[in-house]
Image (cartoon, rainbow, N blue to C red):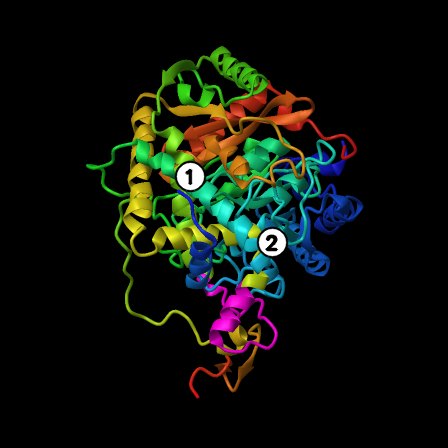
């Protein structure tokens, strides 16, 4: 078995047993990143810092002071601030931004001794579902030529799928962990809102954004989440709820598990082969003793509409800080203060970010606020009530992550609306603030398919258990894209 | 819901967001399409529904009024486009 195909768990065992050093391991992955640079999954590779951190990790391992993840390489989505390292958020606006502090998530992985190899490509300011809005060009899906890896955490998904890193961080505002995980055949978890600190995670839509792990297996995702989760005084929306041991319940039996299938997830919008793949996955759960119950979520169809008011409204407020004064891009020779703002922002932001700032500004402007923003917030409540009602009768809700497998580069760029509508199964979860996972569940034309598992608030351990049990009886998550084995 | 190019120019100014003149038409079309998508919301009666601003109905957490952050002005200004003697420089606002 080659090193790069190993999971976090296996790498951890090998490092603790002294099979190889963290420095050797780090070199293996740095070499792979270089070999497969055509995937464009990284925006920055921090080789020097990585080698220095690996040296420190080796000292800890030798002294017997290492924790479970000490010495294992990983990388962060370029939305997480990393002190002294460019944090671009996929935008020209922050192409010159060297973060002056670490995100809490980054601090936590550093404290756990993981080795960051760099910063991963993403849609500009996390706005996009294909990684095509990145200022640095799209990342590519390792499973098929000229195919998107999904977005916005596209670089994270592509890099983990190609085993350029064993695991990565991502963020999810409307599906940005789950959809790229599904498109690239990896395991992604969007935690409950408030479970993972948002401090130092560049804000897109603050009432929806949530960081989470992207890994090869549910078992690895549990290790990652264990490190990421927890109360943070620096994030005013951080939850004080205690963090359970996510690995402890992975092997619990699923006998009697109640799985809800919302009939709205399986309507005419869903590709037939996708429907068949999800049905096959659900049948595996039946074999494990789960009970399948149809549930109804009548307001689900309004999720995209509500999201495209709430997210742009919040983004138009959050992105006001990019003004060319204190950090980031500044235009040449501004005539006056207004010209400085207008041109710096006009030059620094790409078209998708501009569209969302414009819609958000419009929705929040005088005379339209009630019709758009308040209306969307009311629909948000209806959608949330659909979920909470369903979750009173079932333990988890299952369905597809996406209506189709990964699409071609350029296929949906001409019509932004078409891109938005493809997020129909993921968006509602963010509006409700619930946790959800994407788990590899087969292939359509050699492109991976993701099964979505949605749970109740703070039920991440249950989701990981449900995903892990599926990965004990299937091997979709172990498949490797050709040319990256 | 259809917007005009004038509407878009006005919104862009409110957002202090420069848009190239040749792109205004396409932004106008994009925005009109987005508003049409969003218009689906009106298919549901929400008269007696309370707006939900946030996943959890919690209040802002309070903490003791103690200094927790040191002064990092030099650190933060090291990445600023233009500073002088600890001040951020912008074009003249008053004559």
- Magenta residues, start to end: A320-345
* Subunit of label 2: A
Left or right: A339 in relation to A449: left
- Residue A304 position, x and y percent, is 43, 36
Q: CA distance from mark 1 to mark 2?
A: 29 Å
Q: Secondary structure at mark 2?
A: loop
User: Where is A202 relative to A311, above or below?
Assistant: below
Give the residue at x 39% y 29%.
A301
Q: Which quarter of the figure is the C terminus of chain B placed in?
A: bottom left
Please tell me whether mark 1 sits on a helix, a strand or a loop: helix
Give the label on residue B36, or none.
1
State which quarter of the image contains the N terminus of chain B. Answer: top left
Residue lying at 50% horizontally and 11% vertically, measured from the top left: A287
Which disc number belongs to residue A90? Answer: 2
The residue mark sitting in front, 1 or 2, is 1
Tell which subunit mark 1 falls on: B
């Amino acid at each position: 078995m080659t090193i790069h195909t190993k999971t976090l768990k296996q790498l951890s065992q090998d490092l603790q047993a002294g099979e190889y050093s963290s420095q050797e391991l780090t070199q293996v992955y740095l070499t792979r990143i270089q070999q497969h640079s055509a995937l464009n999954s990284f925006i920055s590779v921090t080789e020097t810092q990585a080698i220095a951190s690996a040296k420190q990790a080796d000292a800890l391992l030798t002294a017997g002071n290492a924790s479970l993840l000490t010495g294992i390489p990983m990388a962060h989505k370029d939305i997480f601030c990393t002190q002294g390292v460019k944090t671009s958020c996929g935008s020209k606006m922050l192409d010159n931004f060297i973060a002056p502090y670490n995100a809490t998530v980054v601090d936590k992985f550093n404290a756990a001794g993981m080795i960051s190899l760099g910063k991963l490509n993403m849609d500009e300011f996390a706005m996009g579902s294909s990684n095509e809005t990145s200022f640095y060009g799209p990342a590519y899906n390792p499973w098929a030529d000229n195919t998107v890896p999904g977005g916005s955490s596209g670089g994270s998904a592509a890099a983990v799928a190609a085993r350029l890193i064993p695991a990565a961080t991502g963020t999810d505002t409307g599906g940005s962990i789950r959809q790229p995980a599904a498109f690239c055949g990896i395991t992604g978890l969007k935690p409950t809102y408030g479970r993972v600190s948002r401090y130092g995670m560049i804000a897109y839509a603050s009432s929806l954004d949530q960081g989470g792990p992207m890994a090869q297996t549910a078992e690895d995702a549990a290790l990652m989440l264990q490190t990421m989760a927890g109360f943070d005084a620096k994030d005013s929306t951080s939850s004080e709820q205690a963090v359970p041991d996510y690995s402890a319940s992975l092997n619990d039996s699923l006998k009697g598990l109640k799985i809800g299938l919302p009939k709205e997830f399986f309507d005419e919008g869903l590709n037939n082969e996708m429907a068949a793949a999800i049905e096959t996955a659900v049948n595996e759960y039946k074999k494990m003793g789960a009970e399948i119950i149809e549930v109804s979520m009548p307001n689900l169809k309004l999720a995209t509409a509500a999201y495209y008011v709430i997210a742009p409204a919040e983004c138009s407020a959050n992105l006001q800080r990019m003004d060319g004064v204190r950090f980031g891009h500044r235009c040449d020779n501004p005539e006056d203060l207004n010209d400085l703002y207008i041109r710096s922002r006009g030059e620094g932001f790409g078209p998708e970010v501009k569209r969302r700032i414009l819609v958000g500004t419009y929705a929040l402007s005088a005379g339209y606020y009630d019709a758009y923003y308040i209306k969307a917030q009311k629909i948000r409540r209806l959608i949330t009530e659909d979920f909470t009602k369903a979750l009173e009768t079932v333990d988890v809700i299952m369905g597809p992550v996406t209506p189709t497998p990964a699409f071609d580069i350029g296929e949906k760029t001409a019509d932004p609306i078409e891109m938005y509508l493809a997020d129909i199964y993921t968006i509602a979860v963010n509006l409700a603030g619930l946790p959800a996972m994407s788990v590899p569940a087969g292939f359509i034309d050699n492109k991976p398919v993701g099964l979505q598992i949605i749970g109740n608030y703070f039920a991440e351990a249950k989701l990981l258990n449900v995903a892990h049990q599926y990965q004990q009886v299937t091997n979709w998550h172990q498949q490797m894209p050709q040319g990256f084995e | 819901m259809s917007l005009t190019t004038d509407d878009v120019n006005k919104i862009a100014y409110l957002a202090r967001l420069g848009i190239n003149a040749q792109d205004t038409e396409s932004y106008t079309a994009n925005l009109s399409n987005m508003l049409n998508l969003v218009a689906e919301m009106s298919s549901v009666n929400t008269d007696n529904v309370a707006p939900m601003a946030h996943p959890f109905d919690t209040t802002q957490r309070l903490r003791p009024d103690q200094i927790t952050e040191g002064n990092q002005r030099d650190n933060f200004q090291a990445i600023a486009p233009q500073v002088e003697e600890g001040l951020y420089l912008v074009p003249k606002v008053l004559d």
